[in-house]
Image (cartoon, rainbow, N blue to C red):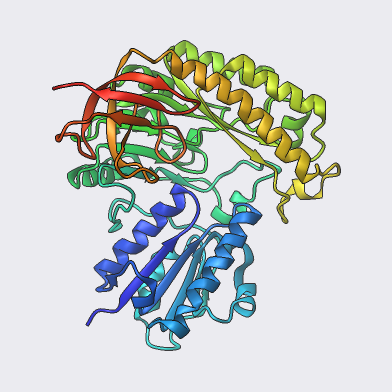
Amino acid sequence: MAERVHLVSLGCPKNRVDSEVMVGKLVGGGFELVDDPEQADVIVVNTCSFIQPATEESIDTVLEMAGYKQSGSCRKLVVTGCMVQRFGTALEDELPEVDHFLGTGEYHRITDVLAAREGAAPRSYVDTPLYIHDELAPRLNSWKPHSAYLKISEGCDHRCAFCIIPQLRGKMRSRTIPSLVAEAGRLASQGVVELNLVSQDSTAFGRDLADGTDLGGLLRGLARVDGIEWIRLHYAYPIGLPESLLRAIAEEDKVCSYLDMPLQHASGPMLKAMRRGVTRAGQERILDRVRRFVPDVAIRTTFIVGFPGETDADFAELLDFVQAQRFDRVGVFTYCQEEGTPAAELPGQVPDDVKAERQAALMAAQADISRAALTAQVGRTLRVLVDGPDAEHPDVLTARTATQAPEVDGVVFLDGPGADVVPGRFVDVRITQAADHDLVGRVLPG
């Protein structure tokens, strides 16, 4: 009888892709996946450690899963991912319940570790992250049958003061375009119609290969994959956006007019302290350039409030920037003081209540901007991709437009869908209502 494995994946979509590769390897190695951890012989937890709350969630999950060694059939617990890479072999003493630890560059060893005879495999595999999966990895998509994340590169060469990612994921290393096109083709053969491209720094894709590979070439290659209808780019660092990228967004029908470009702040002193390498004026020039090439582009961005030294004036400038730029989508995070990052040692740490107030104020301003933009959509007919029942209201179907990314953006609630409106299907809807971040649309016949 095959050993049963339960895998828990925490954190961002990039982590999920790693988990999907592990799942593919486990299934290919003769293991059986189970949804109930109580029934599992082996439990794997793929952790996140980008910020302290993620680390705490990871530890809590590991301890929860360790409980099944007493109450369930679990005989082996394996912890992988960013938390392992961050704290290394120190976790061996802190978490004696765990049998094996695999860092961010070692998750491909999962079947070897589990198949090894007792005591033969080292307890920890933590080294400089070098591995990145290719098209040959037996990945099993776990998101939605019609939508998938495609990791185009791993690691990051930037040294932003608040970020620990380079320590967790290593230096930038890109996959090749043929590898990504091949993986996209395999996903399309499984029913995937939408690709969301992810990495730590998408803008830098191909630079390390030094052979002319860039984002524009990748997008055009993916647009030729039969079955793929939407391609959307995430995590584009603002500096160095190649013209080939902007032209591909403008010219390729399958490439969504959407750009996820984290800006983090707008105040000059804050951008300098964050080591972002750009000023507010520089960011404005970048945004103008993007909109010049792609006039109908929807721009998503994220900001950090409460960074050390952030004054009321700094926050006021950020608020002014958001109101002036009128972004389509905005996420706002409060700064976390992360040990091991330069920002953790900076003076002027901002009180938590001030961070929360600034986050709420910025999100309120963006809600007004978003509602106005979405209200302008009322009466229009839009093409949407049906996702399935809403999590809170299972009797209501949700869908997304080309400028609504999964998990991070709003949705379109479908009013009066017919029997042929099923997940993974594209349908036309007439927009009838708008809220702060979501739309309501009536499905049109046909």
Residue plotted at (56% across, 28% down):
238
Residue plotted at (46% across, 66% down):
45
Quadrant placement of the N terminus: bottom left
**Is 358 rendered above or below residue 375?**
below
Quadrant placement of the C terminus: top left
Q: Which sits in the foreground, 200 or 217? A: 200
Provide residue 308's location: percent of width, then percent of height. 79, 40
Residue plotted at (55% across, 73% down):
63
Q: Most extreme residue toward the bottom, as rendered? A: 118
Q: Which sits in the foreground, 269 or 48? A: 48
Q: Is residue 73 left or right of residue 304?
A: left
Provide residue 300's location: percent of width, then percent of height. 51, 28
Q: How many circles with numbers are drawn on the protein? A: 0
- Is residue 277 visible in the rendered image? The answer is no
Q: Which sits in the foreground, 272 or 327? A: 327
Provide residue 182's location: percent of width, then percent of height. 25, 44
**Is 30 rendered above or below residue 382?**
below
Provide residue 261's location: percent of width, then percent of height. 53, 30
Q: Most extreme residue toward the right, as rendered? A: 347
Give the quadrant of residue 83. bottom right
- Is residue 368 visible in the rendered image? The answer is yes
Give the quadrant of residue 245. top left
**Is 377 rendered above or below residue 224?**
above
Q: Which sits in the foreground, 302 or 126? A: 302
